[in-house]
Image (spheres, grey):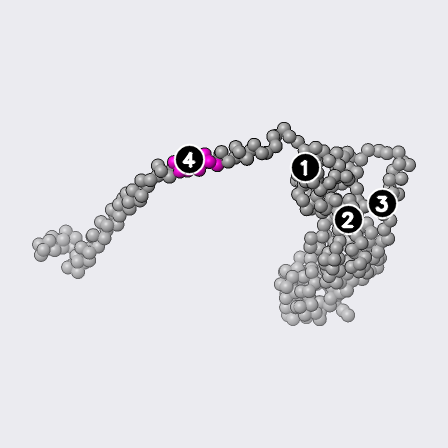
Amino acid sequence: MFRFYRWLHVLTGFTQSQINGFLVLLPLMIFVLFSEPIYRNFVNSGHSHEHDDIQKLDSLITLWNEKDDKSAEFQPSSQTRPSPVDPNTATKTELQSIGLPSWLAGRIISYRESGGSFKIKTDLMKIYGMDSLMYLTITPFISLRTDVTKQPKNEVELVSSKNIKHEVSFDLNLADTAQLKKIYGIGEKLSLRIIKYREALGGFTSLNQLHEIYRLDTAVIQKIKTVSFISQGFTPNRININTAGRPELTSHPYLSPQQAEAIVAYRFQHGNFTSVSDLVKIKMMDSLSINKLEAYLKTKD
């Protein structure tokens, strides 16, 4: 053993303690070098049943294909097409037969029962929830004209006077829930949501602000626009940016908590604002935001 130590010392120049460490490390290095092939051989030996597994998978695939073949017997052939239906007279079942979901077929019938009618195919887009993909899917099975054909003037006037309901216009900033619920498509929740948003704003200055209300359908908005107005010279409630605190500023839909905080901080550092346009000096306020806010802010009481 001494000769072996001496030989390693001459060969490597290691001290006795380094040689002892080397002799301990050497078996570990050999183990690391040969552990990967040993492990791979061990893992591969675990796949001895791979052939059996493949056979089981093949059996499952065969059963699945047989299931699909059986179910196909009960499906209508690709040549079977739904019969065209008239949405003005079709039952809920007939509407579902052309691919409409139950809830959408129910809305068509409710629309019809409330006095609505469909003259051309695109009138179906008036129904809340009818998206363009669904419309394109069912339009081949709708027995209506694609566009409006010209009618004699007296016939058009007769149809108009018979089907169009005369509705009294109202001021959108004064309307209550009862008045809003008279519009088809607006119920208790939507009417309250409109009024709540109006109060948060301080009043509507444009009918286009209706598009900002959560889940208010475009068709309903167009209906509101036809029967409502905003009085000329209407002045909304305004927030004084020189006295309002962060909570009051944040309560406005057009101001984020960060922007409200920035306004208060800027006012503390630089003094009162002389005009609303001074908000442009705040980095978090862009010109678009300031233009929207201008009607709702003030610097003097």
Q: Is residue 41 above or below residue 254?
A: above
Residue 221 image offset from top left, x and y in percent: 76, 50
Taking 147 as reference, is 151 left or right? right
Q: Tell me which residue sits at (80%, 35%) in the image.
A: 148
Q: Nearer the viewer, mark 1 or mark 3?
A: 1
Mark 1 → mark 4, Cα distance in angstroms: 38 Å
Q: Which residue is mark 3?
A: 164
Task: Give the mark, 1 or 3, whose residue is nearer the N terminus.
Answer: 1
Q: For this rendering, which residue is in front, 37 or 157?
A: 157
Q: On residue 98, which mark appears?
A: 1
From the image, which quarter does the N terminus lie in?
A: bottom left
Write the start and end of the magenta stretch as one range.
55-64
Amino acid type assigned to the residue bearing label 3 in the image: Ile
Task: Give the mark, 4 or 3, whose residue is nearer the N terminus.
Answer: 4
Q: For this rendering, which residue is in front, 201 or 49?
A: 49
Q: Which residue is mark 2?
A: 222
Residue 181 image offset from top left, x and y in percent: 78, 55
Mark 4 → mark 3, Cα distance in angstroms: 65 Å
Helix, strand or loop under label 4: helix
Amino acid type assigned to the residue bearing label 2 in the image: Gln
Amino acid type assigned to the residue bearing label 4 in the image: Asp
Q: Which residue is mark 4?
A: 58
Q: Is residue 297 above or below residue 154?
A: below
The residue carrying pointer 1 sits among few (fewer than 14), some (14 to 19) or many (20 or more) residues within 10 Å by Cα, namely some
Residue 9 image offset from top left, x and y in percent: 13, 55
Q: Which corner quadrant of the image does residue 232 belong to? A: bottom right
Would you say the residues marked 1 and 3 are in contact, meaning their CB atoms lie under 8 Å apart? no
Mark 2 → mark 1, Cα distance in angstroms: 28 Å
Whether residue 238 appears in this view of the structure is yes
Helix, strand or loop under label 3: loop
Helix, strand or loop under label 2: helix
